[in-house]
Image: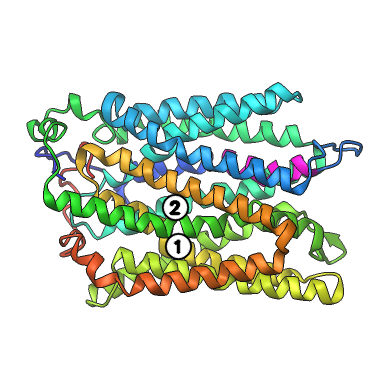
Amino acid sequence: MSNSSSSIPMKTFMGHPVGLFVLFFTEMWERFSYYGMRAILTLYLVEKTDVINPGLGWTDGEALALYGWYTMMVYVMSIPGGIIADKFIGQKKSVYVGGVLLLIGHSILAVETTWAFYSGLVFIVLGVGMLKPNISTMVGGLYKRGDIRRDKGFTIFYIGINIGAFLASIIVGYVGEVHGWHYGFGLAGFGMALGLLQYALGQKHLKHVGNYLGASGSDEEKAALKKPLTKIEKDRVGVLFISFIIVILFWGAFEQAGGLMNIYTKTKTDRMLLGMEIPATWFQSLNAAFIVIFGTIIAGFWAKRKMKGKEASSLFKMILGLIIMGFGFFFMTAAVAQFNSTGSSAMYWLVLAYLFHTIGELCLSPVALSFITKLAPLKYASIMMGVYFAMTGLGSKLAGLLGEWSESLGEYTIFTGIAIITIVIGLLVMLLLKKLKSLTHGAEENEGAIHDETEGVEVADA
């Protein structure tokens, strides 16, 4: 990894570059569109065809199979999205292209025909692949090497993601379930349009991040495109790939939220509150709401812990996040046990499960994004971010398979198995923590607050 030699003044807001908040709102609206569609996808697929708001009438297994393939491909396409950015057009332009593809995809889904449904999914897959890895890499480019604000900056960015997800689950979920599935799909497209507009208006704050390295004014950065990886860089890439195993397991469990847990909420949970039945899609907003509430609190906790010299490495946080999230599935085990006993399960089991899943997510997901920008070689910055999102895609496919298996194994076995496997594997990886940290060659050492806010920002900091 290398730093730009140029020194570019940056405006700040709340102690962070203003560009962070441009990316914050862009991603917020992109996630509004994505999670809005995700909130109603499986429900639309399994809804009967002869009701007032008809769906496609698929079985739960068929719906979860498509959900697994779709969510996997959405993120696997981040690899070619990262390659296109690193090798040809840069991250900034790639985000534009991805946003346009997403707008087209969500708009097509609003059309009530079979061809529109499948075509819309294809455009969304391509759009997320172009946008997702590159906008995240641009966040890392806003901070200098060793700036302790980087992890917190990613958490702030992550809060933007989840404000969008929260609003989507409530608004798009309600519109889709009550007024029509395709109205919900169309509303998701409107959110993407707002995200693109906001991104275009904020370009003045992003002039020096996300640009194609081949057009850089820095000879060092141009040379980085041609130089072979050093031993240190290879070790760091190796650590990243090992951390991706944790990522696959985490998202394989976590993504039950949009699949098996979503259907369980719809069919087996008592959702009556004060005489009103709460829409099943609203429960997916719990995760996003908890992230908004606890995001900066948890980030602040880790920052203080690090400043005191206590264990606060990214790998430690990620492993702990896997364990905490896994523990949350024991609440779903309790929910199924209650349903088997009484014929219904209480809402509070879902609330507790989503709370633990969220705490685990905050320890892993924004931290992993920041970790990649610290360890990835400069010329592979977006590609490695793309690989990360591809791993989340494989996790989503695993989630779909687990959901399908629930039809034969039962929800009790699936939820309990997820809890036990994630906790045990998390503890085993924890035993390797010291060795893995040594292979990062001090990438996270000597991090501290950088108070000179006018210091330079890398053109494409990795």
Residue nearest the observer in this picture, 30 or 206: 30
User: Would you name the residue on which mark 1 appears?
Assistant: 362
Residue depicted at 13% across the width and 38% down the height: 228
Earlier in the chain: of badge 2 and badge 1, it is 2
Residue 34 among those drawn in magenta: yes
Give the image location of residue 187, x and y in percent. 66, 34
Residue 22 visible in image:
no
Label 2 is placed on what type of residue?
Tyr
Name the outermost residue toward the front.
408
Helix, strand or loop at mark 2 = helix
Residue depicted at 26% across the width and 53% down the height: 238
Asked if labels 1 and 2 touch by Cβ distance under 8 angstroms, the answer is: yes
Residue 118 visible in image:
yes
Q: Is residue 309 left or right of residue 106?
A: left
Closer to us: mark 2 or mark 1? 1
What is the distance, in whole Å, between disc 2 and disc 1 at their CAs?
9 Å
Residue 385 badge: none
Q: In this view, does 2 lie to the left or right of 262?
A: left
Quarter holding residue 364: bottom left
Residue depicted at 53% across the width and 56% down the height: 252
Quadrant for the C terminus in the image: top left
Quadrant for the N terminus in the image: top left
Above/below status of 412 relative to 381: below
Residue 158 badge: 2
Q: Give the range drawn in magenta.
A: 32-46
Residue 112 among those drawn in magenta: no
Helix, strand or loop at mark 1 = helix
Give the image location of residue 256, x and y in percent. 62, 56
Residue depicted at 68% across the width and 31% down the height: 186
Label 1 is placed on what type of residue?
Leu
